[in-house]
Amino acid sequence: MPALLIRDLVQVASPPGAGAPLRGSDLRRVDVVEDAYVLCRDGRVAAVGRMAELEPLDDEVAELDGRGLVALPGLVDCHTHACFAGDRVDEFDLRASGASYEELHAAGGGIVSTVRATRAAGEDALRTALERRRGAMRSHGTTTWEAKSGYGLDRETELAQLRAVAAAGGVATWLGAHAVPPEFAGADAYLDFALAEVLPQAAEIAEAADVFLERGAFDAAQARRYLGACRDAGLALRLHADQFTEAGGIELAIELGARSVDHLEATGPGGVRALAASDVTAVLLPIAALVLGRPQAPARALADAGAAVALATDLNPGSAFGESLPLACALACTQAGLAPGEALAACTVNAAHVLGRADRVGRLAPGYDADVVLLDAPDWRYLAYHVSGGDVALVVERGQVAWRR
Ligand code: NIG
Ligand code: FE
C-alpha cells in the first residue's frame, strides 16, 4: 500500500498528549496545526505538521488535496445498539401524541417489540441492516464503533447479534440484561438462563458486558449478579444507569471497576462527585435525551468536577434513531454546556478509552491508526457548530479512503 499524503489542509485538530482519559482542563485543550498535512504509512499516522516543514518524500506517495478542508481523528462511537431489525416508527407516532417511553415499555412495546422483530429477522437480514447503519455512521465520520446485543435475549439471537457486530468490524458488547423477555416470569429467572446458557459463548465474541439498571428492567442486586459473573468470564463492564431514576448504578459501577456508566440524565450532585473521584467514564447520550424529551445529563458539572466524559450516539430504534456523532457534539455544546474541545475529546480519545483502544485511535499523532475525517469547513469547531451536519467530505480508515461525499 503506498503512503497517503493529505496536503494543504486548513487545519489539523487533535486532542493533545498521549494518556487517556482526558479530564479537567486537559479535556478542552485541542492541538491545532494550521496550513497542515497528515502523512499516513502502513495504516498508521507517520507524521502531522505544517506544509512549510514537509520534508521531501522519496517513497511512492498518493496525494489527497486538502484545500478548504480540516482534518480530525476518526470519530469513535462507544455506545450504539446498531444491530437490530424493524423499526419503532409507530411508537414514535404514539409518543408524539403523549405516550411515554416507559409506558410503552411496560405495555410490552419498546425494547421487547424490537426483540420480536430481531428474533424473526434471521442472521442474514440482521447483517444487512447493520451494514447499512455502519455505512451511515461512516458518512458522519465514525471510524471506530461499538454495538450491543440485547435485542435477542435468547441464546441464538444474542450470539447472532454479537457475531454480526464483530463481522462488520465493530466492538461487540453483550447486553444480555437489557429487558426481561416475555417467556420468563421475572428478571431472576431470566438471568439464571442468560448466565448459564449464553454468557460462556458471548464471552468469546464480546469484549464487554452491559446492563440496563432501571425501574422496569434490572435492579442493583440483579445488575451486580449479572456483571459479577460477566467480569469473572473476562468481560469489561458497562452500565446503562440513571436514565430515568437514580437506582445505585454509579455506586455499582465504581464498586465493580466498570469501564463506563452511560445515560446519567437523572444523576444528581452526589453522583457527579462520586464519578469525578473514580476511574469510571461518564458516557453522555444527548440524542436519547433529546428524542425522549428528558433533561440532558449534567455534562458541565461532570466536566467541571474532573470526571472523564465521553459522548456517543446511543443509536437504537426507540430512544435515539440517529448515527451522527456531530449531532451529539452539537447537542452536548448547545444543551449540556460542553465546549467544542471537550466534545471533540469526548467522542475521540475518551470514547476510545471506554473501548480499551486509546493507544490506537482517537488522536491524529504519529503511531495512531490512520483514521482521519475531513470536514469541508474552515474551522474544526464546525464539528459541533454546524447543527445540520453534512460537513464530512471524506473518511480515511487505516490510511485508505473509505468514503467520500
Ligand atoms: O440506551 N435504555 C435502554 N436502552 C436503550 C434503548 C433501547 C431501545 O429503546 O430499544 C438506550 O436508550
Ligand atoms: Fe443505550
Image: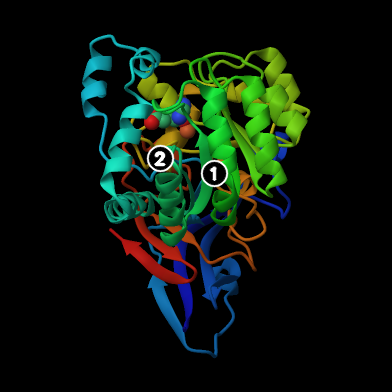
Q: Nearer the viewer, residue 367 or 216?
A: 216
Q: Secondary structure at mark 1?
A: helix
Please tell me whether residue 37 is drawn above or below residue 32 in the rendered image: below
The quadrant in which the C terminus is found is: bottom left
| Residue at 56% across, 15% down | 266
Label 2 amino acid?
Gly
Alpha carbon of mark 1 to alpha carbon of mark 2: how far? Answer: 13 Å
Question: Do the CB atoms of the residues marked 1 and 2 lie less than 8 Å apart?
Answer: no
Please tell me whether residue 107 is drawn above or below residue 148 in the rendered image: above
Label 1 amino acid?
Glu
Name the residue tied to disc 2: 152
Residue 211 in view (yes/no): no
Name the residue tied to disc 1: 197
| Residue at 74% across, 20% down | 273
| Residue at 47% across, 21% down | 185
Q: Position of residue 242 (x, y in %)?
A: 57, 20
